Image (cartoon, rainbow, N blue to C red):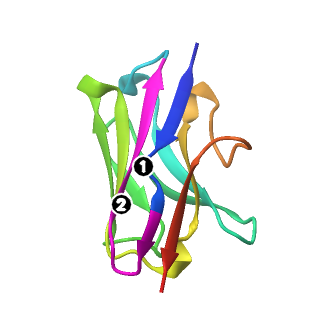
Amino acid sequence: EVQLVESGGGSVQAGGSLRLSCVVSGFTFDESSMGWYRQTPGNQCELVSTIDTDGSTYYVSSVKGRVTIVLDNAKNTMYLQMTNLKPEDTAVYYCAAYAKKRAGCRPGQGTQVTVSS
């Protein structure tokens, strides 16, 4: 069974850092491109970052230079390292596994990030 479990969110002040984790089971990272989405307080679901099986990455322009997506194959865990956080980064963050048809902002899951000014 394919599972993705997000964690690592929290409340921080602007300029702070967080590392989000997505522990996966039921598949390995060489089987699927992976990504992170976020749902803002205004309910907009936005793609934040992706990483392909060849290691190539994508970042939405609003986070470029502040966010790094990383895979740890030994731990079956994907990370989203976020630095210099801004209030507009406040959202619920979700991980995605495209080949496993798990993408977007899925109700009941995700990890909350709140950034105060």
**13 relative to 9, above or below:** below
Q: What residue type is disc 2 on?
A: Leu
- Percent across and percent down for residue 94 are 57, 47
Quickly name the residue at label 1: 8
Residue at x-position 49% and y-position 15%:
26
Q: Is residue 30 left or right of residue 7?
A: left
Closest to the observer: 101 or 26?
Answer: 26
In magenta segment, residue 16: yes
Q: Is residue 4 left or right of residue 45?
A: left
Residue at x-position 33% and y-position 73%:
16
Kindly indicate whether the residue at mark 1 contacts the one at mark 2 (C-beta within 8 angstroms).
Answer: yes
Residue furthest toward the bottom? Answer: 117
Magenta-colored span: 11-25
Name the element at disc 1.
loop
Q: Quadrant of residue 107?
A: top right
In magenta segment, residue 58: no
**43 relative to 81, above or below:** below
**66 relative to 112, above or below:** below
Q: Is residue 104 left or right of residue 2?
A: right
Does the magenta stretch mainly form a helix, a strand or a loop? strand
Residue at x-position 71% and y-position 41%:
108
Q: Quadrant of residue 84?
A: bottom left
Number of residues whose C-alpha sits closer than 10 Å to that of mark 1, classed few (under 14), some (14–19) or many (20 or more): some
Name the element at disc 2.
strand
